[in-house]
Image: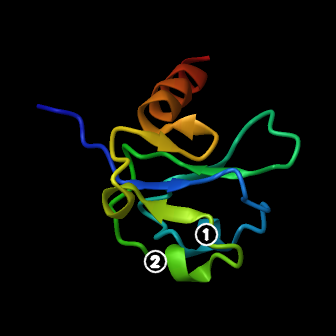
Amino acid sequence: MARKSGHFYIDETCIACGACDHACPGKVDAIYRVEGDFLGRLAIRIEDCIDCAICVPLCPVDCIHDGRAEGVVEGAGGYTKIKALQAWADNRNKD
């Protein structure tokens, strides 16, 4: 079975307010703080994201984007590429 990959990402303008994290449905819990990021920015675990977009309107700095709408599903998203971020998160979770 192919692994699901979500479409939303958080870019580098995140101010770490946590509004998106609180909005993410409890059983989904796809948003997390990037470990080691000195600003405490958040990221979306795209393999867990269900594309509900509840977090998008709550972001005060509009840093959550739909890669499908921007044509970057396989391309750049914020400070890392979406697929690179997924690989990075997978590697971090193994440690």
Dot 2 falls on a residue whose secondary structure is loop
Q: Quadrant of residue 35?
A: top right
Q: Is residue 65 above or below residue 91?
A: below
Q: Which residue is mark 1?
A: 20
Residue drawn where x is 52% and y is 74% of the image: 56
Report the front residue among 20 and 85.
Answer: 85
Report the front residue among 5 and 1.
Answer: 5
Residue 18 position, x and y percent, is 72, 67
Residue 64 position, x and y percent, is 55, 64
**Kind of residue at badge 1:** Cys
Q: Residues within 10 Å of mark 2 (few under 14, many from 20)?
A: few
Residue 86 position, x and y percent, is 46, 33
Which quarter of the image is occupied by the C terminus?
A: top right
Q: Residues within 10 Å of mark 1 (few under 14, many from 20)?
A: many
Residue drawn where x is 62% and y is 64% of the image: 63
Q: Which residue is mark 2?
A: 54
> Marks 2/1: CA distance?
8 Å
